[in-house]
Amino acid sequence: MSIREEALNSAAELGIYECGFLAASEIDVSPEVRRLCEQNACGAYGKSWACPPGVGTLEECLKRMRAFTTVFHFSTRHELEDSYDFEGMMAGKQAHEAIVPRVRAFFRERLGDGIMLLSTEGCRRCKTCTYPDAPCRFPADLHPSIESYGVQVNELAQKTGVKYHNGKNTVTYHSCVFFNE
Ligand code: SF4
């Protein structure tokens, strides 16, 4: 069975709502996304190796992504009480991030460590990040956000067939695994 078939067959068990594949050569970056990071609305800009400018320039990010053959894009969907349900959004984010290590383990078990995962946030693993004075302590477990690499998630979703939004009073989170077939 191919890795694609295995991933599709295991998606529900892994907690994935929707997923799809894309040739990594079709992924692109947008200076506009990087400009949004620079505005630092989330407060994570320049705080770790998982956010700009620590992840590198857009050109470096694009080169890193396109060094793989394939992208596995997956989402999780979470119910909200209403569109102002911030706690529900944060709970959904935590639930999404809880399945990320399982998806990573799924790919690593089959393909080894040579995969890359982009997820939903800047890194807060260590009490004090080494950025920018020394290399990351846990580079193999670093999951920069998809946006930190300059990728428009809604455009990615159009290409992979994964829905960007899933309706009123829900929130959808997205991650990607880059791998070689
Ligand atoms: S794992 Fe630690 S050192 Fe690496 S980016 Fe995250 S907080 Fe910084």
Image (spheres, rainbow, N blue to C red):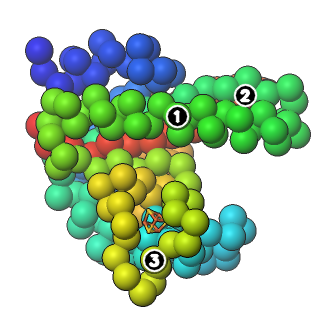
Q: Residue at x 16, y 30 (%)?
A: 110
> In the figure, residue 133 lies in which quadrant?
bottom left
Tell me which label, 3 or 2, sits earlier in the chain: 3
**Which residue position is annotated with label 3?**
130
Seen from the viewer's position, the closer of residues 174 and 167 is 174
Image quarter hosting the N terminus: top left
User: In the image, is the residue at mark 3 within 8 Å of ligand 1 by its beta carbon?
Assistant: yes
Decide if residue 151 is on the left or right side of residue 68. Answer: right
| Residue type, label 3 | Thr
Which callout, 1 or 3, points to the residue nearer the camera? Answer: 3
Seen from the viewer's position, the closer of residues 118 and 112 is 112
Which callout, 3 or 2, points to the residue nearer the camera? Answer: 3
Residue 170 is marked as 2
**Which residue position is annotated with label 1?**
98
Residue 24 vertical position relative to residue 50 in the rendered view, above or below: above
Q: Residues within 10 Å of mark 1 (few under 14, many from 20)?
A: few
Query: Residue 171's x, y, as percent?
Result: 69, 33
Seen from the viewer's position, the closer of residues 92 and 181 is 92
Q: Residues within 10 Å of mark 3 (few under 14, many from 20)?
A: some
Residue 159 vertical position relative to residue 76 in the rendered view, above or below: below
C-alpha span from label 3 to label 2: 36 Å
